[in-house]
Amino acid sequence: MQQKQVRDYIRAIVDFPHEGIVFRDVTTLFADARGFRMAIDQLLHPYAGVHFDKVLGLEARGFILGGAVAHQLSAGFVPIRKKGKLPGAVISESYTLEYGEAVVEVHDDAIAPGERILLVDDLLATGGTAEAGIKLVERLGGEIIGCAFIVDLPDLGGRQKLEAMGMDVHALCAFEGL
């Protein structure tokens, strides 16, 4: 019997959040101890021996992954949150969604100039949220060394967007379509 791969733990939910979309649900991956460990190990693999000061997790599933990755790297964890969710002084970055605009924030003291950052999230689609997170890090003087995702949806162009910004992008699996 062939060993399960990360993509085998990810559930597809048809027509969510609306018709024509196949939602890639990673909560089934997170719920399986073996699958979750495999995903964290594989997210870290390309960065073996690389020093990171902080791991940046994008709301909300990026918090789950980012916390586990930061623990493995003995690095700090920094959340990128939706507007209005962080209690301290923040800087903000807006980005475009298919249906409008959104804003993400980070504490203005979360990253020191020169710190080396690994950005982590569950899914790379259009790349808008990741791009906003990268811009926030750069405004604080941090350096994004890599961007790691569980799922890439290549038809939506996010990888190309981040690579055009000079980012190193790593994804564990890809699914065609929306």
Image (cartoon, grey):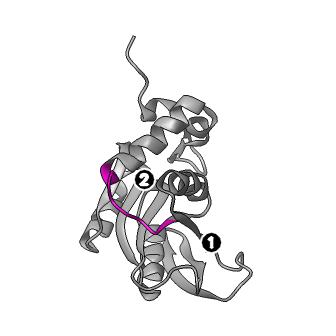
Q: Amino acid at mark 2?
A: Phe
- Residue that label 2 marks: 149
Which residue is rendered at x = 58% and y = 56% of the image?
67
Q: Point out the tag, 1 or 2, that comes first from the N-terminus.
A: 1
> Is 51 within the magenta?
yes
Q: Is 130 situated above or below 33?
A: below
Which residue is rendered at x = 60% and y = 63% of the image?
59
**Left-right relation of 80 to 144:** right
Q: Which residues are magenta?
A: 46-55
Is residue 177 in sight in this rendering?
no
Q: Which mark is residue 81?
A: 1
Which residue is rendered at x = 64% and y = 73% of the image?
82
Q: Which mark is residue 168?
A: none
* Label 2 element class: strand
> Is 91 within the magenta?
no
**Left-right relation of 14 to 152:** right
Q: Is 165 situated above or below 17?
A: below
Q: Quadrant of residue 77?
A: bottom right
Q: Quadrant of residue 143?
A: bottom left
